[in-house]
Image (cartoon, grey):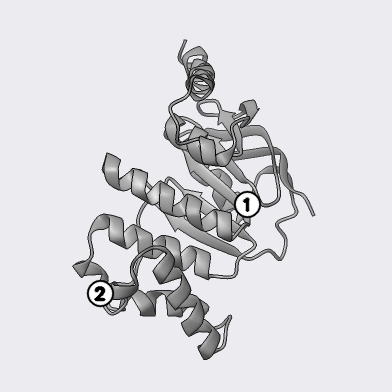
């Protein structure tokens, strides 16, 4: 079933955050929601995950779906090891032998297998976020929600985390909803890029990324032209 939100409104007190917002999410693709900070991107995710109710509008296709999440903060449990953090979200979903195989698989994928017995405080920020990525992919979800997961990382760490994410999603395809205010992230990771206005948020334009996934790391003219076109949408909003 296709997942979408249609003509969604959300207001907090006198503050109108979303105004007639409509987005269709393509199955097994990354839909990147790109918008200014504070425009209501996280509110959209909370509505999709049924944490918030919209004031008006339709939310279809998400009923009964399982979600995994990656946030800006890694949200690891400090008193559990890396292995235990992943096991914690799997314990009610998989039997012990399968949990162990799954944890081992994804810790190897993010190059943290040798740190499985470490507590989060012993890890760098990038390593903690890799553990968070492993946990999200290990969980047998149908939809993955990512809320500015690389925002607090330095440039090199961010690039490595993005590559780790891309490698995992090529092997383990699922529908991904990715929120960011970073154009480079949107072009590199998004198959569909939805550009929002400032608050109250409406959809200004939707780009279907014409660049093949494995080519998005190259600095080609096609990529630069796409970035310029997306940036122009923000410039129009600012003016």
- SS of the residue under disc 1: helix
Q: Position of residue 205 (x, y in %)?
A: 63, 24
Number of labels in the image equals 2
Q: Residue at x 35, y 43 (%)?
A: 159
Q: Indicate whether 47 appears above or below 93.
A: above
Q: Which of marks 2 and 1 is nearer the N terminus?
A: 1
Label 1 crowd (10 A; few <14 / some 14-19 / many >=20)? many
Q: Is residue 122 left or right of residue 71?
A: left
Q: Which residue is drawn at 47% across and 14% down?
A: 235
Q: Indicate whether 109 appears above or below 8.
A: below
In front of the other: 63 or 175: 175
The single residue placed furthest to the top in the displayed view is 239
Nearest-to-viewer mark from 2 and 1: 2
Q: Where is residue 190 in the image (x, y as percent from the top left)?
A: 56, 39
Q: Which residue is drawn at 52% across and 18% down?
A: 225
The single residue placed furthest to the right in the displayed view is 1
Q: Would you name the residue on which mark 2 appears? A: 119
Q: Would you name the residue on which mark 1 appears? A: 48
Q: Position of residue 120 (x, y in %)?
A: 26, 69
In front of the other: 102 or 201: 102
Q: Residue at x 23, y 65 (%)?
A: 123
Q: Which image quarter holds the N terminus? A: bottom right
Label 2 crowd (10 A; few <14 / some 14-19 / many >=20)? some
In front of the other: 158 or 89: 158
């Amino acid at each position: 079933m296709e997942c979408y939100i249609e003509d969604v409104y959300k207001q907090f007190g006198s503050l109108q955050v979303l105004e007639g917002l409509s987005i269709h999410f393509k199955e097994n693709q990354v839909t990147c929601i790109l918008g200014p900070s504070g425009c209501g991107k996280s509110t959209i995710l909370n509505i999709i995950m049924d944490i918030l109710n919209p004031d008006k509008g339709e939310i279809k296709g998400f009923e009964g779906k399982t979600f995994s999440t990656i946030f800006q903060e890694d949200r690891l449990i400090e008193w559990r090891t890396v292995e235990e953090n992943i096991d914690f979200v799997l314990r009610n979903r998989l039997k012990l032998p399968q949990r162990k195989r799954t944890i081992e698989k994804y810790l190897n994928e993010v190059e943290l297998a040798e740190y499985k017995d470490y507590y989060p405080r012993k890890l760098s920020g990038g390593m903690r976020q890799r553990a968070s990525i492993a946990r999200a992919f290990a969980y047998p979800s149908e939809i993955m929600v990512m809320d500015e997961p690389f925002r607090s990382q330095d440039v090199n760490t961010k690039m490595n985390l993005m590559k780790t994410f891309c490698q995992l999603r090529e092997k383990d395809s699922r529908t991904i909803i990715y929120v960011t205010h970073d154009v480079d992230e949107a072009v590199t990771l998004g198959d569909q890029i939805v550009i929002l206005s400032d608050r109250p948020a409406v959809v200004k334009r939707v780009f279907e990324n014409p660049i093949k996934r494995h080519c998005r790391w190259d600095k080609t003219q096609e990529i630069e032209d796409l970035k310029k076109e997306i940036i122009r949408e923000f410039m129009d909003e600012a003016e």
